[in-house]
Image: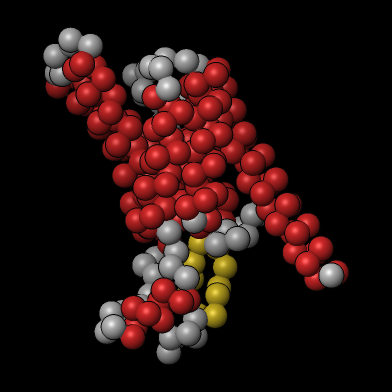
Amino acid sequence: MIYRLITLVKTAVRYTMLFLLTLLTYLLQVCVLDRYLNIGSITPNLMMAFLAVVAVGFGRLRAFWCGAVLGLLLEVMQPSQMLLNLLLYPVCALFTAYMFASKTPAQLEYERSIGKSGRNLSPYLRVMCASAVNITICEVINLVYIYLRGTDISGVNIGRALISIASTLLITLPVLFVLRRPFGIVRKRASVSASPYVEELSV
């Protein structure tokens, strides 16, 4: 009984911390980055970088609801295209979590049993890939929206999209290194393979 209560408290604390961190990410994006860190009016997407870390380290469920919270905040506070942000952010988070989240020991053991390597790639590499996928999807959808509005897509539009992708990737690294230790995101976990440890993003 006491063990279950302690487990519930720890889970509640973790979810609360993640929720507060999601709110902080939104506030930093709209209050700091949008005002003080932009390149030719192009701002790095801190929220997509944050979702990449969550997707890799926390799995599909938490990535989805973090994306839903960010999408809802954007939809309520900065409405642009109807329901676009509300759909885009949770879908991107869920997609990248499916592709890049850390595999469980059971999944790793199954892969080894069928002759595969049975190991996770570097969490840093997976976070960068997830961030690249997130922001690329976002920019492609923005270009499609511009085209559907009757505006020809020019080199300027593509250049702005590429700058947004590059700047978001650059900001992903400090986001990862800031989050990994204070919130226990990177740690050593015992592995069932021959190697003694596998480094993963996890809580």
Query: What residue is rendered at 55% in x and 62% in y?
Result: 202
Query: What residue is rendered at 41% in x and 81% in y?
Result: 109
Q: Which quadrant holds residue 162?
A: top left
Give the camera-side residue of 184 and 107: 107
In the rendered image, the quadrant that contains the C terminus is bottom right
Q: Is residue 79 above or below residue 139?
A: above
> Percent from the top left, x then y, of residue 82?
41, 17
Q: How many marks?
A: 0
Q: Which quadrant holds residue 118?
A: bottom left
Residue farthest along the right direction in this orientation: 2
In the rendered image, the quadrant that contains the N terminus is bottom right
> Percent from the top left, x then y, of residue 148?
20, 16
Query: What residue is rendered at 62% in x and 34% in y?
Result: 24
Give the camera-side residue of 22 and 162: 22
Residue farthest along the front direction in this orientation: 1
Q: Is residue 192 above or below residue 104?
A: below
Answer yes or no: is residue 29 visible: no
> Percent from the top left, x then y, of residue 175?
51, 45
